[in-house]
Amino acid sequence: MRKKIAVLFGGQSSEHLVSCMSAINVIEHIDTQKYDLLLIGITQEGRWLKAGSANEVRSGAWRESQAEAVISPDATKKCVIITEGGISRQENVDVAFPVLHGLYGEDGTVQGLLELAQIPYVGSGVLSSAVSMDKLYTKCIVKSLGIRQAAYVPVMAWELKKGPDKVVKQIEGSFDYPVFVKPANGGSSRGVTKAENREALEAGLKEAACYDGKILVEEAICGHEIECAVLGGGRKPVRSTGVGEILAAAEFYDYEAKYFNEDSRTVIHPQLPEGCVGRVKAAAEKIFNAVDGYGLARVDFFVTDGGDVVFNEINTMPGFTAISMYPMLWEAEGMSKGQLVDTLISLAFERNGG
């Protein structure tokens, strides 16, 4: 008998469209001989709707669905409540795949709902999702590991309102330009800017504050932008892939360069200084374990021309789009997208003793 899998996508974050793109690839690589699909899209306004197919996700037609579909937190039900035409019914769910990026999806919120419902789910748990989503707290954890990372100054949005000149002077006293300005909670480089001077820094701080109340200002690291994929947890040993390099068709790998510039590309197994790949893999696995990661994560680094490995960030629900590095890295290791998706679902069951 096939089990029912609920695939969650969309969401209220700034990465809504990226989540939809990722969901299409996940949906198309789920083994329908083993699983019945229940597709649940979350609009940017927060409505939960039942989608009919991957084609509806691709076209955006799911947003016009008249069928609401919400997960019940009642652990005795383990179900989705579907309401259409004023009539409600329950569909039991065996496992969930939350293909959600950013806030209200990758940050532990949906994971908490699934924990309450006692529905097995793909990916990291509440704690890991929350601390990994918050770049500031991730940095605190990584600092304790002795792994090098970019120096940074944390800025709170309220500090900007109270005294922006003081904030700017503190940053200028810590770093030379250029610097990178990032929302602490965000993804796909939304709200991230590179500041070459004070005017750009002030504008970048205002931009980042639109996305989060916590902001990170980091020193610029010159080097290769490297990504490493991690898989496992629980009873399965943690494994990592070789590395991929981002070659951005822009000054840095911002949102537009990632998803909408055809000249941006990635290279699997790039030429790096000797020994760097091994150090990246070891650091990626160490960070994944330190944040209590489970299932999957993509860990990003810089590798300088001198061979230094510098941690950038960790993503506990990396993209599955056609151009996403995470599945590409596993394909380079001989694991197809279908095998990868099946492994992730199996890990979800294993965490719950299934």
Image: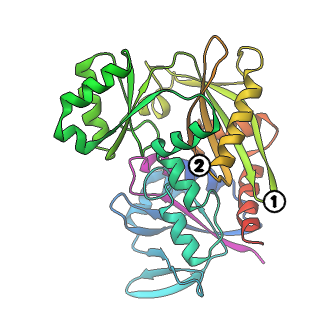
- Residue occupying image coordinates x 60% and y 40%: 144
Q: Identify the amino acid type marked 1.
A: Arg
**x%, y% of residue 167?**
26, 31
Residue 158 figure quarter: top left
Residue position for label 2: 316
**x%, y% of residue 116?**
55, 76
Q: Quadrant of the C terminus?
A: bottom right
* Left or right: 149 as drawn, with respect to 206: right
**In the structure shown, which secondary structural element does the residue marked by tag 2 occupy?**
loop
Residue position for label 1: 235
**x%, y% of residue 206?**
24, 35
Sequence order check: which comes first, mark 2 or mark 1?
Answer: 1
Could you tell me if the residues under marks 2 and 1 are in contact, i.e. CB atoms within 8 Å?
A: no
Q: Quadrant of the N terminus?
A: bottom right
Dot in front, 2 or 1: 1
* Left or right: 4 as drawn, with respect to 42: right
* Mark 2 neighbour density, 10 Å: few (under 14) some (14–19) many (20 or more): many
Q: CA distance from mark 2 to mark 1?
A: 19 Å
- Residue occupying image coordinates x 75% and y 36%: 241
Note whether 76 is above or below 97 in the view shown. Answer: below
Image color mode: rainbow
Q: Which residues are magenta?
A: 1-20
- Residue occupying image coordinates x 52% and y 51%: 131
Res. 9 mark? none
- Residue occupying image coordinates x 72% and y 71%: 352
**As rendered, which of 267 and 284 lies closer to the eye?**
284
- Is 5 within the magenta? yes
